[in-house]
Image (tube, rainbow, N blue to C red):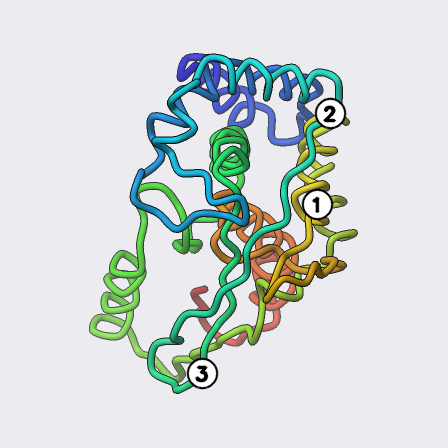
Amino acid sequence: METKLERIAELARAYPSMKFTSLAHLLDKDMLKQCHHELAGKKATGIKGITKEKYAENLDENVEYLVERMKKKSYRPVPVRRTYIPKPGTPKKRPLGIPEYEDKIVQKGLAKILNAIYEQDFLDSSFGFRPNRNCHDALKILNVYVERKYTNYIVDVDIKGFFDHVDHKWMMEFLKHRINDPNLLRVIARFLKGGYMEEGRLYQTEEGTPQGGLASPILANIYLHYVLDLWFEKVVRKKCRGQAIW
């Protein structure tokens, strides 16, 4: 499976305009079982309360049934269980969506595929939620500019409620820049529209991608790549006097 993902990454890197037409088949039994083994066991459960250990009791049968539903296009994610966790530095809390365990497996597989493609597209100035990158790396770059170059301004920006307000229509349009596999796009769209349960009530999701979902970080990065990073690189930077880093 890693070889297949590496090949996708090579193609994405070599052909920046290439659209991938056959990706959903990668979510096969072998990949999904690998995703299962990679998932942490001691995590909060979704609305059905199924744990990794419980799912593993009949792993082969469960994964085979999952693959069968995906092939028949009948697979639909279960609504996530919404809970709230403290927001660091403030008395406020932020919503967290806990997916059902089986949906975590599929989301992890989706994240692997999307990362293989879009890691080749993301700008070097992007650090959040990326493999082998973190906020400390970003601070090191900032430190170099502050200490060694003349600096007029440092702007700290936070996108309020970003995860809750991702536009689904635009999200799918951005994905289509690189993906032309309707089966994979269908699965992603169903995750976005999967809804959430809170205090026994089902809510529809017309926007946003739930914090807590394993595919949410890469989806967020894809969205921000088009609406923020490329905008800064192609529009804002050209209008800046002097040098601007992002």
Q: Which badge, 3 or 2, comes first in the chain's sequence?
A: 3
SS at circle 1: helix
Q: Looking at the image, do the residues carrying marks 2 and 1 touch, with CB atoms under 8 Å apart?
A: no
In which quadrant of the rendered image does the N terminus lie?
A: top left
Q: Distance between the residues labelled 2 and 1?
A: 16 Å
Image coords of residue 57 (percent x, y): 38, 22
For the residue pair 22 and 137, the one nearer the viewer reads as 22
Q: How far apart are marks 1 and 3 (CA)?
A: 32 Å
Position of 227 compared to 54: left or right?
A: right
User: Which label sits in the foreground, 2 or 1?
Assistant: 2
Label 3 crowd bin: few (<14), some (14–19), many (20+), radius 10 Å: few
In which quadrant of the rendered image does the C terminus lie?
A: bottom left
Q: Mark 2 points at which residue?
A: 183
Instruction: Identify the residue at horizontal 30%, vertical 78% (top origin).
Output: 150
SS at circle 3: loop
From this viewpoint, is residue 204 visible? yes
Q: Name the residue under label 3.
A: 92
Instruction: Identify the residue at horizontal 77%, vertical 27% (top origin).
Output: 182
Q: Looking at the image, do the residues carrying marks 1 and 3 touch, with CB atoms under 8 Å apart?
A: no
Q: Mark 1 points at which residue?
A: 174
SS at circle 2: helix
Type of amino acid at the residue the image marks with label 2 = Asn
Q: In this view, does 24 lie above or below 45?
A: above
Q: In this view, does 17 lie above or below 197?
A: above
For the residue pair 17 and 235, the one nearer the viewer reads as 17
Q: Is residue 125 above or below residue 149?
A: above
